Amino acid sequence: MKKFDVIIIGGGHNGLVASSYLAKKGKKVLVIEKNEHVGGLAEYANSLNCISPIIKKELNINIHNIEDTNYIISLEDNQNHTILENKKDKLSFIKTNADQSDQKTFLSIINNYKLFSKTLGSFMYQKPPRVKSGKRSDLFQLISMGWNIRKLGKKNMRELLRVIGLNIADDLEDNLNNDNLKSLLSHESVLGSNLGPRSPGSILTLLYKQAINDNIFNLKNIEVTNYINQLEDYCKKNTVEIIKSSEVKKIVTKDNSVTGIQLNNDEIIESKYVMSNADPKTTYLNLLGAEILDTDFIRRIKNFRNKGNVAKLELVLENEINIKNIDKKMYGKFIYAPSIKYIEHAFNANKYNQYSKNPCLEFYVNANTLSANIYYVPYLVNASHQENEVIERCVGILRKFIPDMKIKKQELITPNQMEEKYNIAGGHWHHGDLEIDQLFMMRPFYGSSQYSTPVNGLYLCSAGTHPGGGLTGINGINAAKKLIEDTK
Amino acid sequence: MNTEKISYKKPLLETPFHERTFEHCFANDWYRWAGYKVAKEYSSTELEYTSMRNTAGVIDITPMHKYEIKGKDAKSFINKLITKDITKIQSNQVAYGIWCNEDGMVIDDGTIFCLNENHYRIFCAERNLNWFCDTATGFNVTIEDISQSIAALAFQGPLSCKILNLLKVENIENLKPFHFNDFNLEKHNVTISRTGFSGDLGYEIWCDPSQAIDVWDSLFKFNRDYKVLAAGMNALEMVRIEAGFIQPNVDFMSAEQALRPNRMRNPYELGLGWLVNLEKEYFTGKQALIRHKENGPEKKLVGLDVEGDKPAVGSVLYDNIKKNQAKEIGIVTAAMWSPVLKSNIAIGFVNKEHYNLGSNVYAEIYHPEELDYRKIWAECKVVKKQFFNNPRKNAIPALT
C-alpha cells in the first residue's frame, strides 16, 4: 500500500491550494474528493475577484480579468433605478435619484470603509496570532495589529473603533437620505451572513468582506472552472494523487494523534497528517467524532454559527433577457433590496426559521440565463423548503423588471441542498458567520485557531478558518505553511 | 390562575418527607438546597451530631440531583465523563468519581450507581444536566433528570445496620461498602446502598416518593431504646468535616460556576489524584491533567490539627508569626471543634512549601467573645484529611 505524508479531505478550492503548497515542499499528498470533480463550492461562485495574488504568482495561475468596467444596478419598483459604474476601482454615478450631497456622502462613506478595511486587510494573509501562547511571534503580531489600527491617525482610529461594533443601518441613516443608496450598502453587508441591517456588527462584516474582496462590491468575473482546472493540473504535475467520487467516513486516531482515514468502503489509508477541507462542524462531529473531544470544546463546536441563508436560483429563459429601463451595455450586478426596512423585514422571517415573503435578490444575466442569490432562505432543521413557493416569489419580483419572462428551465439550490451536495454543515457560504467572535484568532473557535486542532496531526484548511470563505485561497496557504512548520 | 403556583407565594419546594421533617423541626430553621427546603437544625445541632456518632441519624437528602443514564453507550459515556475507570465497576456497585473540564479543573463529584452496563445513575450536589448532555454528544445514550422521582434518606451511624436488622431488612449486614441492592423495608421495596457522608457505618435509602413517610417512620420505630434523631444540615456539615469529605462551592469552586479562573481547582490540588486514571484512552480534561500531574499542585487541600479549642473558621494561614515577616500561605475552608475526637480540626488550602504531612503552619483565628473578637495565633500541623475513620465503616458483616 502507498504511504502518504498528508491526506487532504475534500478537493475544494482550499484543499487544492493546500495540496499544491504541500507538494511544492516535497510532501506526498493524497486528496480525497466526494464528488466527481474537484473545486467544491467554487463552482457556485459567479463573480469573485478575491483570489490571493500570491497564489496567482507562486502557482503560475493564469487568469485574466474579463472586464475593467462594471456596473451595479440597484432596482427600484418605480423603475427609477440607480446605476453605479465601477471603472478601475473608481466608483461613480451614472444615474440616480439621489441629490448631489447624498451622492457625495455615499462615495465618501465608501472611501472611509475602504480605508478601514485596508487596515483589517493587513491581517488577512497572516495566520492569526494565538492569544496567551507565550510565543514572541504571536505577541509581535498582536502588537503589529494594534499598530496598524493606530496608524490610521487619531480621528480615523476613533471612527473605526466607533463603527466596528455598530449596525450598518445606524451609520447610513445618520449620513444618507436616499433609501436606495442606504439599501445598496446594507445589501452588501448582510448578503451571505446571518445578519440584518440592524444587527450589531453588520459594519464589521462589510469591512471584512471588502478586505477579502479588495472591493466593496464583488465584481470582476473570473472563469472559475478554468482556475480550478489550472489548480488541479498544478497538483497533478507535482505528484499529488487525487481520488474522486470517494468519501471519507472517519478520521482514525489513537492516543490523541491521527493515524489515518477510513473511507466509506471501510478501506483504511494510513498517514500521520490529515488536513480537513470540510467545515469545522463536519470535521469534528462527523469525521473525528465527539467522543474524543473535550466537552467544553464540543460546546464551542455546537455554538459555531453556521446557518446558511442564501439560496441560488438558476433560470433559463426562452428569449434573451431585457431589463426594463436599462441600457443593455450597462448590465452587471443587479440588486433588488429597495430599502433598509425591506431587508430588515426579510430578515425577521429568518430569525424564526422561515423564508421571507418578500426576499432580497442579487442577480446577473447572460443572454437568456439568469442566476440569482436569494436571501433570506434559511437552512432548515428537520424540515424541507417549499421550493416552488420560493421560486414563485422570486419570479414575481423579477417580472417587475423583466415583463416578458418565459421560463424554460429553473433550478433552486437551497442551503439544505448545498449542505448535502458539498458536505457543508448548515450550507453556509463561508462555513460560518463572519462576525466579531468568529474572526481572526477566534475563527472557527477558541482551541481550534491557527489551522490546528486539539488532535495531533489534524489540521483544518476550510473556509471555516481564518480568513473565511470567498475563494481567497489564503486558508489553504496558511494551513499548509502551519503543517510544514510543525513537521520541521 | 392558581396563586399557589406563583413562586413568591410558595418559594421553596417541600420534599416528600416534609410532613415529618416539619414536625421534628422545632427550630423551624430551613436550608435552601436546589429549590427545596431541608432542615438546617431540628432542635440542637450537637444532639443531632451525637446521634450520628453514637446511634444513628436520619438526613433528608432528597434535593440531591439525580440523573439516569440509559443506552448502549452508557458505559463509554460515563468513562468519558469521569476521570476514573468505570469499566471496573460491576452491576450493583457504586463508584465515587469526579468530572473535570478541558482545563482539568474539577466541576463536581458524585456517586455513580451501576444498575447494569447500559444503565447508570449519577447522584451529585450541583446541577449537571447541561454538562452531561454536552458530554453525551456522539454517544447513544439518554440522560434524564430524575431528581423529583426518587426520595432519599441518609441513615448514618454505628447502629444503623442494627436498626435495619431489627426492621427485618434481610441480609443487610452483608451489604459491602459501595454496593447497593433492593431490599424489603417493612412493606416497601426500596434500594439501599452502603454509602454516606459521615465516615462511619451508614446507608442511603432510595425510594419512591409515595413510600417516603412510611420509610421515615420505620426508621424511628425502635426509638425507645435507640434514640434515632432526625439530623439537619449543620450536623451533616460536622460529620463530613470529621470524615474529610469535600464539598463543591464550599471547599473549592466548581469549574462550571467559578468566575475567576484562578479559583478553579484540579484533582491533585484537592487530594483527589487517586481518582484520576491517566491510562484511560480518553476522558474530558485528560491532556490538561497529564500536565497538572507533571507540574505537581501549587497548593493542596489538607487536614489541619489546630492548637487550642477555638475553631479556625475562615482563618488565613501563615508560615510564621514573626511580626512583619509572616507570609500568607493558605486559607481554611472548613473548621470545627470535633466532639468525638476531642480536637480542633480544619480543612484548608496550603501552598507547595507547606503541604507535606507534618509541616507546621499558623492560623490567625478571630474568636468572637461577647461582642468582641479575640485574635489568636494557633499553630497547626498538616495531617490527613480523614480525621475520623472508624474501621466499622468498612467491616463485613456490618456491626449489628
Image (cartoon, rainbow, N blue to C red):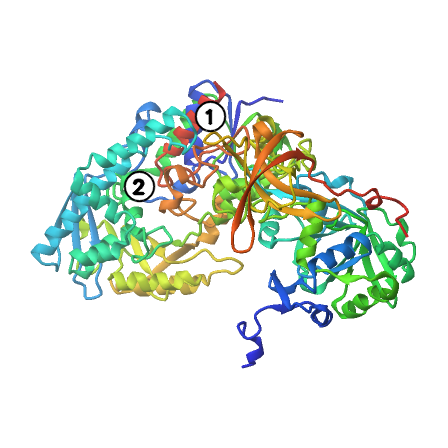
- Inspect the image, locate mark 2, and give the three-letter code of the amino acid beneath it: Leu
Q: Residues within 10 Å of mark 2 (few under 14, many from 20)?
A: some
Q: Is residue A286 toward the left or the right of residue A432 in the image?
A: right
Instruction: Please report, as a chain letter, where disc 1 is located.
Output: A
Which mark is drawn over residue A483? 1
Q: Which numbered disc, 1 or 2, marks the residue that appears first in the sequence?
A: 2
The residue nearer to you, when weighing A62 against B315, is B315
Name the residue located 20 percent from the left edge and 40 percent from the top edge. A115
Left-right relation of B362 to A188: right
Q: Which mark is residue A48?
A: 2
Q: Is circle 1 on the same chain as circle 2? A: yes
Residue located farthest toward the left when viewing the structure as drawn: A100
Residue at screen point 23% across, 41% down: A116
For label 2, the SS is: loop
| A364 with respect to B70 (left or right) | left
In percent of width and height, residue B319 lies at 55, 31
> Which residue is more in the foreground, B327 or A394?
B327
Instruction: Give me the C-alpha separation between circle 1 and circle 2.
Output: 28 Å
Q: Chain of mark 2?
A: A
Secondary-structure class at tag 1: helix
Q: Quadrant of the N terminus of chain A?
A: top right
| The one of B146 and B30 positioned closer to us in this rendering | B30
Residue A230: mark: none
